[in-house]
Image: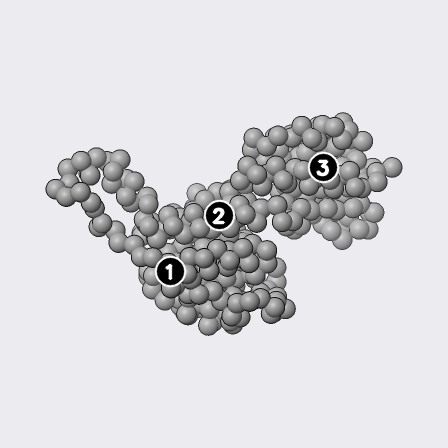
Amino acid sequence: MKIVLLDALTLGDTDLSALDNLGQLTTYATTSSEQRLQHIADSDVIITNKVIIDKAVIQANPQLKLICIAATGTNNVDLAAAIDAGVAVKNVSGYSTESVAQSTFAMLFQLIHQSRYYDNYTQSKAWCESPVFTHISSPFSEIKGKRWGIIGMGAIGQRVAEIAGVFGCSVCYYSTSGKNSQQPYQQADLSELLSSCDIITIHAPLNGQTENLIDEQALKLVRQGTVILNLGRGDIINEAAMAEAIDEYGIYHGTDVLAVEPMESSHPYFSVKQQSRLLITPHTAWASSQARQTLVKTIVNNINSFNIS
């Protein structure tokens, strides 16, 4: 069995040795659009994180048996073309729940505690010149008693809700599909959630119901000082509108995802004046060491459980 991993660089320093035992493994750090056919060659199994496997690629590889997506989202594979060609597609779900939940709180606390400001203050030796023992020029508040709204109450949203409750937050949620009504938390419509919550976190997939969900009109409902964190997908938020809202409405915004990744040098977030209200991480929330190892283990199981003749 010939296996190709197209974008190993996205997995960082994860131990990939378990994949070597499955067959003849070829690994590429990255694969550009132009390199896909060359890198896939005569492989039976493709492992891809973000490399796009479209209809043309599938049709050009009649030997292909299985596409393993090293992620939960399947939007980088033409599923209809795979079905037509008799190629199985397997993704991985649930591996990053703890990692994303932890990243949500790391992002929240860095924003509301203004950790970057205080670190810069001490690193500049300004504290050495202080006439008193403390410095609280950038105030912060506790999250206990805050109303926390969750957009997308899947496994990650549920875990975030559980932890938020431990901190003493009152949790409500908006179901992007409209079908999730069995949670032990208050269900709210989107406008109610946006206008009433102090903290809003997004843990939804990108689809027809969520694309551009948080647009210019939605942001006008949000109160000054509200924290909005996007741990879902970039296109859920209108990024140009958010850039303006940070400055105009006093919103705090943290995001781990953008509509176009890697980030473009012309992105509107670079023009935000109140940079202390903005925190961006480069799509790392999913990627704790434990989560990445679980991801690889599940890919191995997906390949082992598939009968490749």
Does label 1 or label 3 sit earlier along the sequence?
Answer: 1
Residue type beneath disc 2: Gln
Q: CA distance from mark 2 to mark 1?
A: 18 Å
Q: On residue 206, which mark appears? A: none
- Choose between 100 and 132: the one closer to the eye: 132
Say if residue 239 shows up in the picture: no
Q: Residues within 10 Å of mark 1 (few under 14, many from 20)?
A: few
Q: On residue 300, which mark appears? A: 3
Kindly state the secondary structure of the residue where label 2 is placed: helix
What residue is disc 2 on? 102
Is residue 93 shown above or below 308? below
Is residue 27 shown above or below 58? above
Name the residue at 80% across, 41% down.
306
Residue type beneath disc 3: Val
Q: Is residue 184 left or right of residue 125?
A: right
Q: On residue 144, which mark appears? A: 1
Residue 308 drawn at (x, y percent): 84, 38
Residue type beneath disc 1: Lys
Say if residue 154 shows up in the picture: yes
- Choose between 179 and 274: the one closer to the eye: 179
Is residue 83 shown above or below 23? below
Residue 257 drawn at (x, y percent): 50, 49
Residue 97 drawn at (x, y percent): 57, 49
Q: How is the image coloured?
A: one colour
In the rendered view of the protein, which quadrant contains the C terminus? top right
Kindly state the secondary structure of the residue where label 3 is placed: helix
Residue 283 drawn at (x, y percent): 51, 44
In the rendered view of the protein, which quadrant contains the N terminus? top right
Q: Are marks 2 and 3 in contact (CB under 8 Å)?
A: no
Name the residue at 68% across, 43% down.
69
Does label 2 or label 3 sit earlier along the sequence?
Answer: 2
